[in-house]
Amino acid sequence: MIRLEAIVKTYKNGEFETPVLRGIDLHVAPGEYVALMGTSGTGKSTLLNILGCLDVPTGGRYILDGVDVVGMTDEERSRIRNEKIGFVFQQFHLLPKADALTNVMLPLVYAREYPKEARERARALLARVGLHDRMHHLPTQLSGGQMQRVAIARSLVNQPKMLLADEPTGNLDRTSTKDIMELFARLHADGNTVVMVTHDEETAKHAQRVLRMQDGMIISDQRVVRTPAAISFETAP
């Protein structure tokens, strides 16, 4: 699903250059669930933005679902984002004056889907995330966990092949965090490829692989090992 080869990202400000990613090599298979960890400033969000075609690397190759996206135009990358990628952010980014159903339908409106199909698909997704009785509630009438569920339903409405999440539980309490992570587990079990940025070790344990970043590089790639007694990590081959 994802193949990164020697990905470099450097930001320039006049004569000054700030290297953020320093040669990232990464393969993610279809259907994998990957957590990306590291302290602030290690390049996690920059890497996620490149994976989501929101940013382009300074150097290297990015093959997404068999397509080299680095050399694409902005319009081509926009189409790829709309067709293949769903995004979930720490901040929910819901329209405050639109109800849950309308917020979920928005990507389909941009994709020029027929309104009837858009509404039916959005209704089904809200039911899937447990909000069948909150479809006509405004964001201000929902809890943090419920707003994140709306955001997740919105990320799925275009039937993407990959779901990218940036600290999706960062603004949630313990109970809501547990509910959202159970929802991600169900989405992964349904066959979705998931890449999630998180700073929380307990959240990372829900993934199959944990990648740890430092100074713009991936310094470890571990598989999560689950046994009846405990959860541990082992180095990925």
Image (spheres, rainbow, N blue to C red):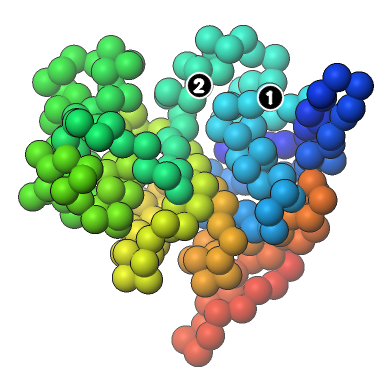
For residue 105, side relative to residue 35 (left or right): left
The residue drawn where x is 22% and y is 43% is 139
Q: Residues within 10 Å of mark 2 (few under 14, many from 20)?
A: some
Amino acid type shown at disc 2: Ile
Above or below: residue 82 compared with residue 34:
above
Distance Cα–Cα, label 2 vs label 1: 13 Å
Quadrant (top left/top right/bottom left/bottom right) for the N terminus: top right
The residue drawn where x is 56% and y is 18% is 77
The residue drawn where x is 64% and y is 13% is 72
Look at the numbered disc 1 and give the secondary structure of its residue: loop
Residue 99, quarter of picture: top left
Q: Are marks 2 and 1 in contact (CB under 8 Å)?
A: no
**Residue 160: horizontal and vertical position, in percent?**
41, 33
For residue 233, side relative to residue 20 (left or right): left
**Residue 9: horizontal and vertical position, in percent?**
78, 32
Amino acid type shown at disc 1: Val
Mark found first going from the N terminus, 2 or 1: 1
Look at the numbered disc 2 and give the secondary structure of its residue: helix
Residue located farthest toward the bottom when viewing the structure as drawn: 229
Above or below: residue 77 compared with residue 38:
above
Report the residue marked by disc 2: 80
Report the residue marked by disc 1: 56
**Residue 85: horizontal and vertical position, in percent?**
47, 32
**Residue 75 can be seen, yes or no:** yes
